[in-house]
Amino acid sequence: MTTPRGPNPTSGTPGPLDVDVRPLLRAGDDPFQAIMEATSELAAGQSLRLIAPFRPVPLLSVMANRGFAASESALGDGDWEVLFSPVAAEPEEGLALGSSPAAIFWGEPAMELDLSNLDPPEPMVRILEALEELRPGEVLFALLAREPVFLFRELAKRQHEWAGNFDSAGIVYRLLVRHGGGARGHG
Amino acid sequence: MPMPSLSRWTMSYFAAALGCLLAAEGLAMLGIGYPAAGMSEPATLMLVHLVAIGWLSLAMAGALLQFVPVLAARPLASPYLALPTLMSLVAGLLLLCAGFATLAGWADVPLGLLPLGGLSLLGGLLLLVVMLCRTLAGLRRLDPFAGIIRGGLACLALTALGGAAFSTILSGRGGALGAFGTLLPGGLPFHALLGFGGWLGLIAFGVSYRLFAMFMIAPEPSGGRMNLLVTAAGMGLVLAAAGLGAPTVGLDGGSGLVATVSLLLALATGFYGRDMLTLYRSRRRKALEVNMLASLPAFAALGFGIGALPIALIAGAGEGFVAAASFLLVFGWLGGLTLAQLTKIVPFLTWLEAYAPRIGKGPAPRVGELLAARRPLVWFALYYGGTVLGSGALACGATLGFRLAMTLALAGTAGIAAEFVRVRRLSQVKAADRPPPHERPRLLLARADERSLSHDDPPRTQPHIRHARSPRC
């Protein structure tokens, strides 16, 4: 069902990975897992070309959350082709290591914390405690005095997503954390 | 995604370092080394290297392996070298001490062990330089902190190269070194200046800017303020490097150059002192914790020591005064500052190991609660009391007084070391708030599960997608 294409001769980036879900749907299977598996196999910068017998509207927001922009075209007979291209394969300059490229698509923060007057590890404690209060998908915004490097490790373990950077003056660190929905009760 | 994590071997470095300090203080208490022996006699050299390499360099290396990645927001490069580095340094130090013991006539081991020790130390220190420089190489912009660390590591490399040559000369094989066989005795004071002033001193300066701003919640001084310090110290240390190499071309740096280098280092210290004062005054955390309180005598020792050293050198004061000022700098400033900061670093790393995974899942103590509140201050009073008395005894040439002073310092150090053991064992924490036994920190090394996350990708699964609806809906 998935067909890798040869590398793009001009850029060296692999060509789009083709995923045709029409046979799966004809067989009565749910293609979602197959699409997600194909997405996780993409090389850095590689796009995914999806062919479906309808316009896959809900998938557009799922892929947007994973950092893909969509360009779609009707193929006729009700079939659609959607090309999902990675918005940013690498975090932007200045964004913290591990920052999610999808952060620009996150909603308004459900909670804002000013932790700039606390010394490590207190900001980490407050953020992890606050995340326990939030629901999956909700976003927390925090101001800190420095990059919370030890927090990132703990966020990754608990499967939350984050994006952070310093303000232009380099004084205040701004951090967005999106509740990943998993990993409650173990660490 | 790679990210900094707990350094696995840092506690082992700290433990080995404290062991060396206790050993050196114990030997001094027994009357071994200066002032009972001459300044450059083997017994003194053994003590000096136990302190410089065993105590200060191992503690500094352990701290850098943890904090350079944190301050550079990069994972440590080649972390698998941390243990070979420690083993190489400890083995090198033991061989070196065995060689000095033979030269002093206490033991009868082949003198060939002396250069072997020098080589083992050189190898270990170069491994350390490789790990730290590769970690800093990931930094995109030119950072004054990274510059100071690189400068300090360059001084370390020169000190270690000089030391390896010295050990070869002392073993009677100097002829094999060609022009480098002439490095002793002219290069010796510059070897000490590069080691204590460049590697240990300069890096202590650089790390203070970052860590103290963090500990006291003060605005970090701008890079511009550090430039004056870097310029003065840089000039001094380049001259020291020239002084170390001068004998190879038939020149002798001499006491004038030693005094000039120490004057430039004193000037750099002036800039550092000004910035540290600004940091203390602009701090937002008003109550000082044990680590910052116990650092205050270290700053005082730095001021007195670095002020007195060039004066003693220029005025041609006796050996005792130079020894007293140097002792104040090494034990009061570098040693005191290291012990003081360990009272923050050890509980902080222990807390991260034991409690970070538990936040939000139950009660967790604060970092400060891992360390006893008042008792460490008593130990520091003993340590600093012994250091001040010891410095006075050296200035007066009072051998017995120095031994008594070192007894006080030894008692203080032992007390502080015992507090660290209590921190690692979570002895101060209520029994109900301790993690289950299999999750508690081990005394000498951080748990391996911390390491795996730092060098592998985080889970690729993004759980919110699992709950998303099928595209068919």
Image (tube, coloured by chain):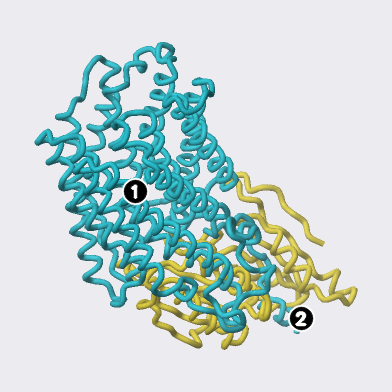
Q: CA distance from mark 1 to mark 2?
A: 61 Å
The single residue placed furthest to the right in the displayed view is: A27
Choose top left, top right, bottom left or bottom right for residue B454: bottom right
User: Which chain, by letter, is yellow?
Assistant: A
- B455 or B27: nearer the viewer: B27
* Residue B54 percent across, percent down from the top left: 45, 43
Choose top left, top right, bottom left or bottom right for residue B239: top left
Q: In the rendered image, is residue B154 in sight?
A: no
User: Which chain, by letter, is cyan?
Assistant: B
Chain letter belonging to callout 1: B
The answer to whether residue B208 is left or right of residue A155 is: left
Question: Residue under circle 1?
Answer: B203
Residue at x 32% of width, y 32% of height: B37
Chain letter belonging to callout 2: B
Q: Residues within 10 Å of mark 1 (few under 14, many from 20)?
A: many
Q: In the rendered image, is residue B4 in sight?
A: yes
